[in-house]
Image: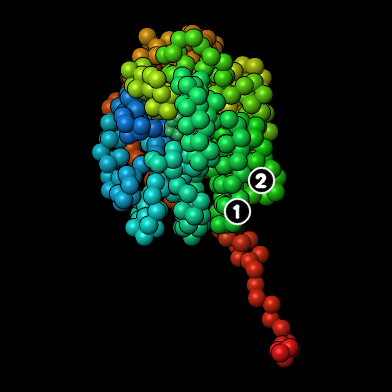
Amino acid sequence: MTTVIKGGTVVTADLTYKADVLVDGGKIIEIGEGLSGDTVLDATGCYVMPGGIDPHTHLEMPFMGTYSSDDFESGTRAALSGGTTMVVDFVLPSPDQSLLQAMDMWHNKSGRASCDYSYHMAITWWGEQVFDDMKTVVQEKGINSFKHFMAYKGALMVNDDEMYASFQRCAELGALPLVHAENGDVVAELQAKLMAAGNDGPEAHAYSRPPEVEGEATNRAIMIADMAGVPLYVVHTSCEEAHEAIRRARQNGKRVYGEPLIQHLTLDESEYANPDWDHAARRVMSPPFRNKKHQDSLWAGLAAGSLQVVATDHCAFTTEQKRYGVGDFTKIPNGTGGLEDRLPMLWTHGVGTGRLTPNEFVAVTSTNIAKILNCYPKKGAVLVGADADLIVWDPEAEKTIMASKQVSAIDYNVFEGKKVKGLPRYTLTRGFVAVEDGTLKAQEGHGEFVKREPFHAVNKALSTWKELTAPRKVERSGIPASGV
Ligand code: URP
Ligand code: ZN
Ligand code: ZN
Ligand code: ZN
């Protein structure tokens, strides 16, 4: 059974043109004019684009004494409803747990996914077993990226010596290190000081994580990556200080990528001043929302190419879970949702305002991500042979975001009341039509794990340069007699 998407305009990261797209066996088999198929999807007035890839989600994540409430079932349905056809989640080994065992636990959870998924592996502790497991993970298990938390002291945080060791291992294996860049030592001190002063509300979460802690850690990670001879991906870049460090590094020839979130692009710090405790606590995430100066910097970075991708860091906690932190802001589970709203919000506030072109929208929501994470052109492309992960995007369709109508399992939405213009008319996951005329028909278990190969080009380029410029012993023709 073939499916044809007819009458639309194909929009990719670099081209815009009128064409029909023919799909069979989960793949794109032909692109051209006047195609026919068994099932016809009408794309008149619509853009046909690669499905969104969210490079940063936490589904059913064990964190801060609880589990995030969207799991692979509700989370991937939410993703598809908003036009995202692949998510990349984080495997989090507990202390002393083998990476392979942790990965098995994630596979047990992800079987219910209705769209494709991949994993980053977190380095949460360091030792010989981790060093050894990293090789198996890269060479046999299809994971080529390792996450390092520079914050969450006493829990997920790793220190500089562990990070440097792990980055060097990534360099050897052709893997990409990721960092959550905040200075965890300084955050812990600021938290204690604020609590001691009676500053225990959700707004203190933001006070304890100023842009400086992010800028410092981002710069430190960049320098450590450079010394290890490895590229670096900085997750949830939220402020000018971090963006500046990334921009400067890139101008100096370092291979560094930055990932703003849709939340940081569109929501600001005034949310924490809301007199309603629940309202503010629901928006507690790390890094916190910032002011307009930082938002403008992130938008500029996407247009200029100094920041490459837009994610959600989807990590959804219910109001009841957020209330664990009444009287102590450090106990509010950190995280916000966004999976089903990322594309409509970015289209509305990016393309709708002229800050992004439709091609740039495709680049930052899909193609750049697939390239950076090494699954292009299987994902992130409208090309013959690519997976038929596609969206038929109606730029005229509108809705108001409301928790009462969302797919996500939680009881509120941080974008509540926002009007969006631009929604998927159809979403296809490997050819299966999961959104039809705006109605969700996701199929539990349809999602498959996407294996990602180690990086060849970028890591090879860096290791070649590192080797060429390595310190060398000076060979001398004669050595003077000792002066004694
Ligand atoms: O607050 C956040 N971002 N929660 C999810 C875990 C993380 O730091 O990415
Ligand atoms: Zn993080
Ligand atoms: Zn995260
Ligand atoms: Zn299927």
Q: Residue 91, percent across and down?
A: 36, 41
Q: Amino acid at mark 2?
A: Ala
Q: Taking 255 as reference, is 384 left or right?
A: left
Find out whether the residues at labels 2 and 1 contact each other: C-beta distance under 8 Å.
Answer: yes
Between 368 and 297, the one nearer to me in the picture: 297
Q: Taking 409 as reference, is 242 left or right?
A: right
Q: Which mark is residue 249?
A: 2
Q: Residue 349, percent across and down?
A: 59, 18
User: Disc 1 on helix, strand or loop?
Assistant: helix
Residue at the image position 25 percent from the left and 38 percent from the top = 108
Is ligand 2 closer than 8 angstroms to the Cβ of mark 2?
no
* Figure check: 207 above or below 367: above
Residue 349 in view: yes
- The residue wearing badge 1 is 226
Q: Residues within 10 Å of mark 1 (few under 14, many from 20)?
A: many
* Figure check: 330 above or below 223: above
Q: Amino acid at mark 1?
A: Asp
Q: Taking 39 as reference, is 468 left or right?
A: right
Residue at the image position 33 percent from the left and 37 percent from the top = 448
Please identify the quarter of the rendering in which residue 268 is found: top right
Q: Residue 103, percent across and down?
A: 31, 45
Between 378 and 408, the one nearer to me in the picture: 408
> Between marks 2 and 1, how big is the CA–CA gap?
9 Å
Residue at the image position 40 percent from the left and 20 percent from the top = 327
Please identify the quarter of the rendering in which residue 115 is found: top left
In primary-sequence order, the first of circles 2 and 1 is 1
